[in-house]
Amino acid sequence: MSVSQRYLEKSTAITGVGLSEVARPSLKSPLCLTIDACVAAIEDAGLTRDDIDGVTTWPGLMDSSPGMSEVSIQEVKEALRLRLNWYMGGGEAPQHGSIMSAVAAVAAGFANHVLVFRTVTEAQAQTPERRASVIGVTGSRLTSWFSWLGPVNAVSASIWVAQYAQRHFEQFGTTSEQLAQIALIGRRNAQLNPQAVMRTPLTMEDYLASRFIATPLRLFDCDVPVDGSTAIIVSRLDAARDLRNPPLRVEALGCALHGRFSWEQVPDLYETAAFDAARMMWSRTDLKPSDVAVAQLYDGFSFLCLSWLEALGFCPRGEGGRFIEGGARIARDGELPLNTNGGQLSQGRLHGYGQIFEAAEQLWGRAGERQIANNPRVAVCSAGGGPVGSCFLLVRE
Amino acid sequence: MSARPLPRLTLDNTAFWTGGKGNELLIYCCARCAQWFHPPAPICPDCLSRDVGPRPISLRATLLTHTTNHQRWYPALVVPYVVAVGALEAAPHVHLMAELLDCPASSIRTGMALQITFLHESDVWIPQFRAAAP
């Protein structure tokens, strides 16, 4: 059996993407932002709503964290009066859960063109008393893995990630000046992105002078809550060839979790789900890290991005800090351009989906002033941290 | 959110969250292979025996990593405070995340010995770390 018959994600492709305004806050409703993105993505693909026969989202409607996910598939289906053969949304998956299930649905023949959306409205949902992405914020008792974190006041992912970063600093000699490069590169790229919310110049001095959130993580190591929606069309590759854009084939996808479903129980407090997902992804392709022209790696926190660089094999274990030192290697004209839209640290927290949008923009050569040179053909996208991780490779046909 | 978030008690986790009432850290252990494991579950993750249940374990641990949190995530939170991950001395593969109290940041060292005490809130007893007496 050939590789393309065996790994059926290769029979699927991204054919269109859409992004709403990104603002903090936006005056538009969560549903309005979603529809803006969905209509743009359908049009971008050269399709009409009549072609869309599947819809998916991640994590689906949830009210346990303000602004985390306030739009349901039901509302989108009704607003656009879609005729669906397949739909699915739910949170028990890595952050790319929607892409994963869209790919699976298309490969299984349940749908030809799946509309994927992810809407975050954490800026408009925040109040001084009610912050986004803090567990237990609604006052109800905690269940599942959050129940081991909230009661000890580890109520924010900042704390979980900071503990991993602290260990990395101690074990491998990683420094604040090295970690800063993720934030500094992001900000430099964001200055060329009209849809980024943080565009003022950021220097090393600014970074080092910024306040600690959870040591060793500072303000600029943490992403920015925004309002915005991303939509992506996942299509059957053989139904994608005549559309508006050259299809971006899903070359390989990784979503494995072989280790513990926990932050604190991971034996070495190092090897997170990112490593399992990356190994799975590379096992499904002949491509190598050196084939990647542009990397859009999850930077909900700067340290997670550094961890993805190691997990994906762009540098050896523990070498992430030295790999990004000085920033030249990950700049737009470096050997591995990283988060060319500014990432979540500077564009805003679109929760892994801003990275997918930007990968498509770069592979289709329409990233404007921030377009990288040499006609990039292969991109890698990743999302998640701790026990949640997924990644995939896109190849322009 | 006005106060510390608390766990929903279940048949599986009640021993862990209430053992502190008797100053005991109750961790699940397998009666067949003597393996300690956490979080609690109705089956041994090693030998799959169903003969498992909570048992008191030593209140000592070793610090693996920590962070000093400076952000006031909810109004009643008093900052800064330290959250650490410790390996239980009697079962180092079992980790516990807890606040580290009364320990100035400059004296925190990976590998330091920790003592577990408990904070009583509502119907639960939350483990907390302190530096162990040498």
Image (spheres, coloured by chain):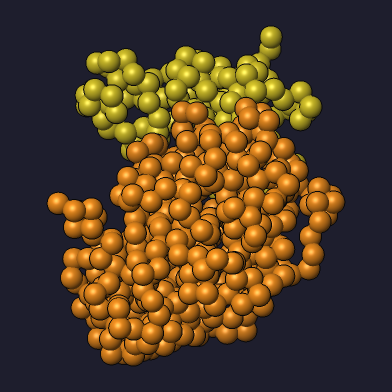
Chain colours: A orange, B yellow
Q: Quadrant of residue A89?
A: bottom left
On the rendered structure, is A102 left or right of A197?
left
The tally of labels here is 0
Q: Position of residue B49 (x, y in %)?
A: 22, 24
- Front residue of B83 and A57: A57
Give the x, y percent position of residue A182: 66, 52
Residue, far left? A1
Q: Quadrant of residue B10?
A: top left
Q: Measuring 34% from the left and 59% from the top, which residue is drawn there?
A: A251
Residue A263 placed where, x, y %? 49, 39
Q: Is residue B33 visible?
A: yes
Tell me: A382 left or right of A85. right
A282 to the left or right of A174 = left
At a point 24% along the width and 75% down the height, the residue shown is A238
Considering depth in this image, is A138 or A341 the residue closer to the camera?
A341
Q: Position of residue B129 (x, y in %)?
A: 62, 26
> In this rendering, is residue A233 above or below A257?
below
Furthest residue in direction front, as rendered: A374
Q: Observer-nearest residue: A120 or A318?
A: A318
Q: Quadrant of the C terminus of chain A?
A: bottom left
Q: Which sits in the foreground, A71 or A313? A: A313
Q: Residue at x 44, y 41 (%)?
A: A275
| Residue ID at (24%, 69%) | A106
B27 to A115, vertically: above or below: above
Q: Is residue A345 visible?
A: no
